[in-house]
Image: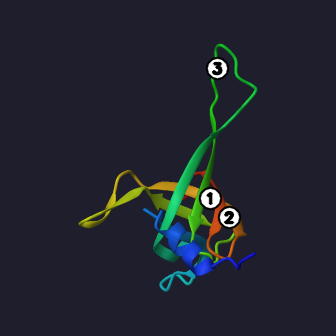
């Protein structure tokens, strides 16, 4: 049985990264004028290539009057980025064209769940959420 070539595997996965995201984390920020310290979202990684994947989950609590559809949304991104549970993620669906990267949808905000690391990538369960 041969060894897995993780570099080649990673290159293949990253060919699917047509989206971009910025990862924010709450950090203590001191206002220089008032010297007041507050927690504010600070970008720790900006415009990172990624892939947002969404699939509908089956549910058994549907009725004739209500048809709830639940989704599982995942972020696929480079494994060396340190993403923590609770980080805020602003993601934009995109498409690679001959002219470069082009956004194809509005920015959406998510909150990160616990990352699951692989040698070639990481998967992060994300929940759609607005944040201040």
Q: Earlier in the sequence, mark 3 or mark 2?
A: 3
Judging from the image, what secondary structure is the residue with disc 1 in? strand
Farthest top residue in view: 64
User: What's the distance in space between the residues labelled 1 and 3, CA to CA?
Assistant: 27 Å
Q: Nearer the viewer, residue 46 or 125?
A: 125
At horizontal 61% and vertical 56% (from top left) the residue drawn is 74
- Quarter of the N terminus within the rendering: bottom right
Q: Residue at x 70, y 34 (%)?
A: 58
The picture quadrant where one finds residue 2 is bottom right
Q: Earlier in the sequence, mark 2 or mark 1?
A: 2
The label on residue 66 is 3
Q: Which residue is denoted by mark 2 in the rendering?
A: 86
Q: Which residue is drawn at the image coordinates 62% and 74% (left, top)?
A: 120
Question: Dot 1, how many residues are within 10 Å of its Cα: few (below 14), some (14-19), or many (20+)?
Answer: many
Q: Are marks 2 and 1 in contact (CB under 8 Å)?
A: yes
Q: Badge 2 local density, few (<14 within 10 Å), some, or many (20+)?
A: some
Query: Where on the picture, by quarter, is residue 63?
Result: top right
- The answer to whether residue 13 is seen in the rendering is yes
Q: Can you give x and y, in whole percent of width and height, for residue 92 in the image?
A: 43, 58
Q: What residue sits right under mark 1 in the picture?
A: 111
Q: Say whether disc 1 or disc 3 marks the residue closer to the N-terminus.
A: 3
**Is there CB contact under 8 Å for labels 3 and 2?**
no
User: Tag 3: Cα neighbours inside 10 Å, few (<14), some, or many (≥20)?
Assistant: few
């Amino acid at each position: 049985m041969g060894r897995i070539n993780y570099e080649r595997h990673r290159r293949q996965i990253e060919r699917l990264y047509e989206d971009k995201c910025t990862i924010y984390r709450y950090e203590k920020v001191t206002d220089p004028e008032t010297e007041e310290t507050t927690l504010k979202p600070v970008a720790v990684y900006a415009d990172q290539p990624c892939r947002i994947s969404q699939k509908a989950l089956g549910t058994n609590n549907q009725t004739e009057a209500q048809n709830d559809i639940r989704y599982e949304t995942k972020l696929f991104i480079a494994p060396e980025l340190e993403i923590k549970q609770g980080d805020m993620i602003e993601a934009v669906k995109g498409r690679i064209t001959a002219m470069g990267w082009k956004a194809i949808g509005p920015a959406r905000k998510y909150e990160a769940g616990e990352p699951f690391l692989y040698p070639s990538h990481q998967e992060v369960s994300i929940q759609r959420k607005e944040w201040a």
